[in-house]
Amino acid sequence: MTSDASVAFHIRFVTEKHNDLKVSLKQLVETLVGEKIDAKTSQAKDTLKRSNDLKASLSKQDYPAWLNPLIEGLNHFIGSRWKQKNLIEHLINNLDSINNHKWVFEKSEKYFV
C-alpha cells in the first residue's frame, strides 16, 4: 500500500468512527429529552464507547479539542456525578464543533519509509 493509499485509508477509517459517534450523539440527545432513565444511561454508554473507539484510532496529537471533554462528561453522567442538565449543557456547547469537525492529517515523509 502506498503512503497516499495508507493516509486515505486512515482518513476513511477515522471519518467512519466519527460518523458513528455523531449518530450516537444524535440518539443521545433524543433520549435525554425522553422519560426513560435507563435508556438515557444506556445511550450515554453507547456514545462513550463510540467516543473511545474514535480516540483509539487517533494519535494523541490528532485528538480534537472536544474529544477528551466529551469522554469526561459522559463518564460524569454515567457515574452520576453529573445530572442530565449538566450533560445537556455540555452537548449544547460542543455539538457544533463535534458535528462540523473536519479531519486533516498532515502528510510527513518521515512517517513513510
Image: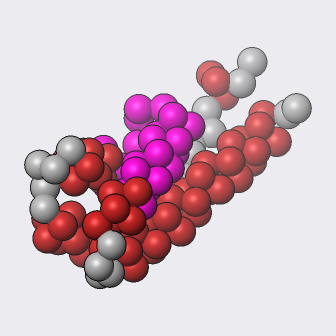
Residue sitting nearer the eye, 50 or 99: 50
Q: Quadrant of residue 93?
A: bottom left
Q: Is residue 61 magenta?
A: yes
* Magenta residues, start to end: 43-69
Residue at 14%, 70% (x, y): give it. Answer: 85
Residue at (70, 52) in percent of width and height:
12
Can residue 92 be found in the magenta stretch? no
Decide which of 67, 9 is in the foreground and name it.
Answer: 67
Residue at horizontal 76 percent and vertical 45 percent from the top: 9
Residue closer to the observer: 43 or 68: 43
Q: Which residue is nearer to you in this view: 7 or 75? A: 75
Q: Position of residue 33 (x, y in %)?
A: 29, 81
Q: Is residue 98 visible?
A: no
Q: Main secondary structure of the magenta part?
A: helix
Whether residue 10 appears in this view of the structure is yes
Q: Which residue is outermost to the top?
A: 113
> Looking at the figure, which quarter contains the N terminus?
top right
